[in-house]
Structures are given as structure tokens and as C-alpha cells.
Image: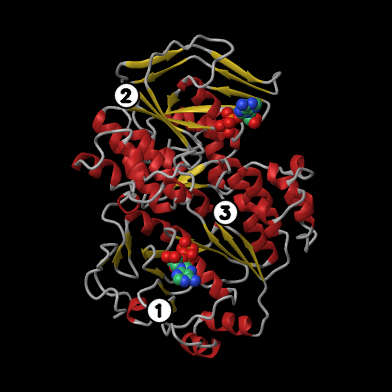
Amino acid sequence: SCGICVEKCPFDAIEIINLPTELEDDPVHRYGENAFALYGLPIPEPGTVTGILGPNGIGKTTAVRALADELVPNLGDYGTDPGWERVLDRYRGTELQTYIERVQAGEITIARKPQYVDQLPAQFGGTTIDLLESTDERGALDDYIDRLGIRPVVDQPLDTLSGGELQRVALAATLARDRDFYFLDEVSPYLDIGQRVTAARLIRELADEEDRAVLVVEHDLAILDLLADSLHVAYGEPGAFGVITDPKSVRNGINEYLTGYLSNENMRIRPDEIEFHEHAPRETSKSTPLVDYPALSKSYGDGEFSLEVESGTIYESEVLGVVGPNGIGKSTLAKLFTGALEPDEGDLDFRLDISYKPQYIEIDQPMRVDAFLSSITSDVGTSYWNTEIAKPLQLERIMERNLDDLSGGERQRVAIAAALSEDADLYVMDEPSAHLDVEQRVQATTAIRRYAENHDETVLVIDHDIYMIDLLADRLMVFDGKPSEYGHAGVPQEMRAGMNDFLRDLDITFRRDERTKRPRINKPDSQLDRKQKKQGEYYYAP
Ligand code: ADP
Ligand code: ADP
């Protein structure tokens, strides 16, 4: 056995039915006594996009450092300098052997897109084009600049770019290189759905047309599904140990992940299955309106951006999803509703108490998480609060930490908890999926949904993760327009009509996975894609 898990996982992270073979062997790498241990390695293959699906802190970066020859795996002997020979011995006869031989011979070159694109401006001074031109090794840069829509910002200094612009610049800079192996640590952060789909298609082309090996970590499952050919599920206990499974087909891998059971490994990684609905939720006879709001308009400066909002109704106890591209006015609307901004036209005489989780969280005080949350509600520490808020948002282990040294994902969870802990008539969540890994998204979704249902609360959720919107929303408000110029917010609609409006604009259709009913993006111009467009059914089964 691995010495960590004998029969029952002491971390309660996984239910061990049979010890997976990976855990019977020595780890691939262990950082030290009682330190993190990694089991299993992903296999980069030319012409293939390989995905890794799993929480952060599970060893994905460690694995990539081994594949990039930055770390020689010690096979668990952490005091020694093992050398590649022993690693090669271990993998003789497997697909990794060829790869390792090439690594040893210094034949593998790698390009890497880091996870935290916000740090780019600190690493490269200068303008965007300076950075981009230094990476143009295949003559493909111009095409990437155009298709990723970053032409308007190329002459700007990097430190003036938004998160979404930095993400696209980082992607262009990585893909433009001429390397054997590309590692992309998350593609979707800060991008809207259209941008995510474009990024996925560019990455696919690199594998399909240039025969490169690509390895991606991605937490937006609709995008991972579109991107990858095969995937490794990563599971274990973040910070303690991680297991990277043998590759599975992308369809099967995501399905197994959602059902919570890995069949080859005979391993349950989550007690509950995550379920999707093939058919749109039935139109419900709506309860009492929480608020009828009038048509609104708001513009910034001398009309550089203007937003028009159609009048509409938000009902009590509903979760209203809000979707649309970046820069179209979604946060502006949230700020109008909260009263942080005054509309130019339309009278918002709400008298509603609104609890608002902003997109970017500005809690930078040297204050402990428990003290901060206790300043919002006296429920902190009660069994009700622990079960409904702290546990699903995994706050227990960070309650004693200071707000100013939390990671992005930890901050996001504290902010969601803070927003849900307030007593309010309407809860507005601006991008709750940001910075969360796939498992945390599942848990945050459950926490928000359960909170709304158990307390008959009304929630407005703005997000780009279509799985999160699908699982959370009862109805949908769709924004369209021209980003950064004008936006139009439509009337809240039933899910089917809303999804159709939204996806028609994006020219994307979804089919349903037979087994889990989860939505999968259709290949453009495939038979299904054409049929559904003709029927006008972009998302739900007719
Ligand atoms: P992921 O990429 O999945 O988020 P990492 O591979 O970065 O995970 O890290 C896995 C675990 O290994 C983390 O708990 C991290 O703290 C630990 N770790 C990473 N590098 C080292 C190191 N040099 N020494 C000790 N522990 C490390
Ligand atoms: P979204 O939330 O859909 O990404 P926002 O509501 O944040 O969009 O922004 C819509 C547009 O308004 C963007 O072009 C943004 O740059 C601009 N904008 C947002 N806030 C301000 C402001 N305070 N002053 C001027 N322009 C702004």
C-alpha cells in the first residue's frame, strides 16, 4: 500500500473500494517526509489534446514539471537523486517510455501558459506587441491576434490590459511558439463563452493540423469537453496526495467525474451524482413578483458605453441566470440594482435589501476569515451555518487565516459565504465560478442552490460557465449588443427561450450526452448542428 491509504482514506477524501494499482506502487514523486505525493503521470501524445480534470493542489503542476524535465521524479525516495534511468526502468514498455527517452535526450521543447495571467505584467514590462512578437516562432501570430480579438490592444502596455485581454494575449503567446509539447494551465478564466469556444478551437487546430502534443487543465467542463480528445481524472486530497488516472476518452472521463465514480479505478470520488435535465424545466406558474423593474438606461462618460434594459419581473424564490459576452453591461446592471449606480433613465424605487457578491473581491484587510464572517452574521459556528455554508464552501480549514493571504479560490469562497450570510431580499452573485476549480464549482453551485431552495430566497447569478448556469438557473436574462459600445438586457425568460436567444447569437448548439444528459457543444456544421439550428433548438431536446 502507499502508506497513506490502507483501507479507508484517513482524509475522508475518497472511498477506497479496491486500492487502485497506482496507490499500491511507490509514488512517482514525493516532496519529502509527510509531504505531497503524486501517483501517476499524464501522457502527452503528438496530435492529441489531453485534458486533466480535477481539483487544484492535486499535483497537476508537479506532473507537468516532470514531463518538462524540470523535476526528476524520485519515485518516493525523497532523500536521493534518482536520475532518469530509474524512472525509465519503471515505465519501460509503456507509452511514457518513448516520451521519457526523448525528454532525456533533450529533444522535447515545451511552451507553457501559466495559470495566473494577472502576473504577466509584472514579469514583462513593455507593450503587448513586444511580448507577442518575441513568441512568433511559426508565423502564426497574426492569425491568433485576429481570431482572439486582441488587435485593438496590441500597442498598449501589458499592465493596462483587463484579465480577459491578458488571458487571450497569454494564449496567443503560447500557441505561437514552435514546440513539441504545449501545457495550458486553464484557458477559460476571465473569458466569456464565445471567447472560450474560440480558444478551444485554436488549441484543437494546433493538435490536429500541426500534430503537436497539448496538455490542458480546465475547470469549465463544456470547454474541456470541446477541447480534449482524452483526459486523465486527478483525484486525492489536495495538499496531501494526488492520483492521475490512466487516460479515458473525454466523454467517458467527464461522465465518470460527474457520476462521482471512476469505473476502471473502482473508486468513488464523490457521494452524489451531478444531474442535468435533458428537457427545459417546465414553465412554472410563477409565484409573487419580488420586483417589477421599469426600462432603464445608463451610459458612461460621454456615451462611450451605453446600456438599455428592458422592463421585467424577478419572482420570489427564483434563481435568475444572467448570460452575455464580456463588456456588455452585466456588472453595470448589477450595480444599478444594488443602487451603487444611478440610472440615467428609469426610476429604480426598489426598497429591496440586496446582498451583492462583486466580480472582483476587494477584501484586503489583515482580518481573519472567521472575524470577517462573524461581522456579517451571528450564525457563524452554528450547526445550520456550518452545514449550509461552511462545509459546501470548504471554509473550515481557512477560518483562521487572514483575508489578505488567501488564494483567488479561497477568496471567492469567502465572498460567496459572506454574500449568502447576509439577510437580504435579493442575492446578486457576479461570477461565482471565477478562480474555483471544478470540484469547488460543484460545491458552490450546490451551496447556492440549496440556500435558495431551503430559504425561498431569490438569487441572480451572472456566470460564463454553462454547466453552472444550467444547474443553478430557473430562468435566464440574456444580454446582447456590441461589447464596450452598447448593451441590451432582455426580459427574463424561461430557460429554453433564453438559451435559444443566447446561443443563436453565438452560433453554437448543444447535444445531450446519452448517459448523463449533460450538454455537449456540437461540431459546427455537423448534422446535428445544422438540424438543431433549423429547428431553432440550440440547447434543450425538442
Ligand atoms: P496543482 O497543479 O494540481 O494545483 P501542484 O503540483 O502545484 O498542484 O502541487 C501539489 C502539492 O504539492 C501542493 O500541496 C503543493 O503545496 C505541493 N508542492 C509543490 N511543490 C512543492 C515543493 N517544491 N516542495 C514541497 N511541496 C510542494
Ligand atoms: P460586463 O459585466 O458585461 O463585462 P460591464 O458592465 O462591466 O460589462 O462593462 C460594460 C462596459 O462599460 C465596458 O466597456 C466597460 O469598460 C465600461 N465601464 C464599466 N464601468 C465603467 C465606468 N465606471 N466608467 C466608464 N466605463 C465603464
Q: Amino acid at mark 1?
A: Pro
Q: Is residue 256 left or right of residue 80?
A: left
Labels 2 and 3: the sequence-earlier one:
3
Q: Categorize mark 2 by other alpha carbons within 10 Å: few (<14), some (14-19), many (20+).
A: few
Labels 2 and 1: the sequence-earlier one:
1
Q: Amino acid at mark 3?
A: Tyr
Q: Which residue is mark 1?
A: 27
As drawn, the label of residue 116 is: 3
- Quadrant (top left/top right/bottom left/bottom right) for the N terminus: bottom left
Q: Which residue is mark 2?
A: 284
> Front-most of 262 and 369?
369
Labels 1 and 3: the sequence-earlier one:
1
**Would you say residue 59 is visible in this rendering?**
no
How far apart marks 2 and 1 lie (CA) works out to: 53 Å
Q: Residue at x 32, y 44 (%)?
A: 370
How far apart marks 2 and 3 lie (CA) works out to: 42 Å
Disc 3, SS: loop
In terms of image quarters, where does ligand 2 lie? top right
Q: Is residue 276 left or right of residue 205?
A: left
- Is residue 261 placed above or below 315 in the rendered structure? below
- Is residue 161 placed above or below 49 in the rendered structure? above
> Front-most of 353 and 428?
353
Q: Residue at x 76, y 54 (%)?
A: 132
Report x, y in % for residue 497. Answer: 47, 27
Q: Is residue 441 left or right of residue 359?
A: left
The mark closer to the camera, 2 or 1, is 1
